[in-house]
Amino acid sequence: MKSKQQWWKEAVIYQVYPQSFQDSDGDGIGDIQGLISRLDHIAQLGADVVWLNPVYKSPLDDNGYDISDYYRIHPMYGTMEDFDLLLEEMHARGLKLIMDLVVNHCSDEHEWFVKSRQSTENPYRDYFFWRPGKNGGPPNNWISFFGGSAWEYDPMTDEYFLHIFTKRQPDLNWENPKVRKEVYKIMHFWLKKGIDGFRMDVISLISKHTGFPDSEDPGLEHIVGKYYANGPRIHEYLKEMYQEVLQHYDVMTVGEGPGITDEIAPLYVGEERDELNMIFQLEHMFIDWGPEGKFDPVDFSLIALKEYYTRWNRVFEKNGWITSFLDNHDFPRMVSRFGNDGKYRVESAKLLATLILTMPGTPCIYFGSEIGMTNAPFASIDQCRDVETLNFYKILKEKGMTERDFMAIVRKVGRDNVRTPMQWDDTLNAGFTSAIPWIMVNPNYPELNVQNDLASDDSIYAFYREMIQFRKKHPCLVHGSYTDLAPGHPELFAFRRVVENEQFLVLLNFSDNPLKFTGILPKEIDQPVRSNYSGHAEKHQLRPWEAQIFHIQSGT
């Protein structure tokens, strides 16, 4: 890992999904004033940066990732005055704020699109990709991330527009320099307010193959890799963005990178490239997807996960930077996906925290992970709110899948699992709201909540606080090299971090059973400096879901 120091390398990010964090006005929806009231929770955890999911004006077809006005706050979240107060209160606590920059697409209610669809000659027509149909159907066979064609027919002008997400999220045409100038204007507006950077939504998709050829393979994975991601002008656009905007501010940029492989990642984040600081690489987030994608889940392989970490860290050890995360608003709760959310929920949540906070790169903690929140027991499709889930239910129902079978899949992979309200205490609706919440509260909140965790020195929250401080005290865990010590073991994740005269060994048991190991620890090393269990384990043995960290002096 490159050792040049930057504040955003040493930082720990905490992600807030605003609809689900804290309701302040009794409408069942989280808001900015609610977030302000809970800032001390984030600061006391030890986080440095808050990534706030979109709070812009939006019809909420995709929960705010369909923006109709980039310069206004959605009324359900509050006002611009509320936002200005949020920024002031965050900075007063030493917290930085990064916002979502969603500019691959906008909402179909945005003024640009409303005007563009009025006629083929409208000045805003070229802000989007409008094309005539072909052979009585769409211009090509590209499909949407959320199912169905990536083209929507508009009878007003007898043409189709491109939308690689929902049909209410038309893709912006970055080929048009006027669009790019509008984006840079938006960025300047928020940066001049004093925000500390952007998480850039699907930024790897903004450059399109404008010939729009049919894909020889109709599968989404192939189309994303060949046609959606890493388009012909992507680096030209990102360099222009840096020159026009980013170089003028001391901010962090995190690009969400679907389709970015480890081979080409340095082109996005190489320190000499003047593009992005780091990316949210997503390859490991697809590790348990089956042949038919997300709604065809398979068991995840620890060996495959370790191979992923080795490949990506080998790249970034030479140049650039990366993030460390295991869940966010688009993927299931990590303790339900990669851990054991039953008998060993506490132990496995702490183990996963250890992994995130000892891995190279900037850690990102999704709200609720610090208390081990789990996937939710959704029983019927009526309880679901996510457009992706609702779309795929229609598709799979037409293919003969029952609601019961589909909901069993949703409870494993659905995005609503990570959007249930924050569990603050054991009062009504987990202390999130006094009203009917916009989405169900996980019924395990009476036992699993912040209040309970704060009352215990051995809680998941206490462990996160301890591990964040431990990471900050040891530059090795930020800048050190990474080596996998047991790549072929199906249950043991063991790796070494090294920088100059400091070394750490991290041992993680990804199983419900005790695990013995040999040949990893030097003879002189006796007990770990950190563990997610109280009391000492037998030497060369890990208890179920145990995490151990060993400190090794130089030369040992």
Image (cartoon, helix red, strand yellow):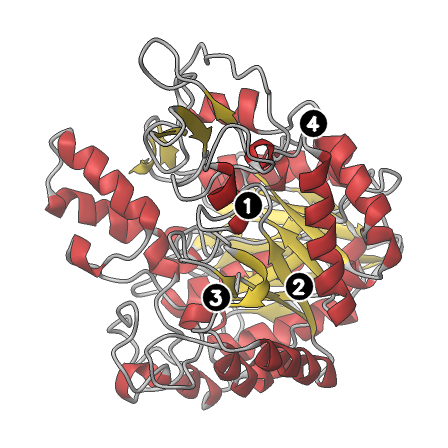
Residue under label 4, please give it. Answer: 263
Disc 3 and disc 4 in contact, CB within 8 angstroms: no
Of tags 3 and 1, the one toward the viewer is: 1
Q: Residue at x 63, y 71 (%)?
A: 467
| Mark toward the viewer: 4 or 2 | 2
The residue under label 4 is which amino acid type?
A: Glu
Q: Which residue is mark 3?
A: 17
Q: Where is 422 relative to 190, above or below?
A: below
- Separation of disc 3 and disc 2 at Cα? 13 Å
Q: Secondary structure at mark 2?
A: strand
Q: Residues within 10 Å of mark 1 (few under 14, many from 20)?
A: many
**x, y (%) of residue 244?**
83, 47
Q: Looking at the picture, which amino acid does disc 1 mark?
A: Trp
Q: Which residue is mark 1?
A: 112
- Tell me, yes or no, if residue 390 can be seen here: yes
Point out the tag, 3 or 1, that comes first from the N-terminus. 3
> Which sits earlier in the primary sequence, circle 1 or circle 2?
2
Does label 3 or label 4 sit earlier along the sequence? 3
Q: Are marks 3 and 1 in contact (CB under 8 Å)?
A: no
Tell me where residue 41 sits by quadrant: bottom right
Q: Is residue 370 left or right of residue 419?
A: right
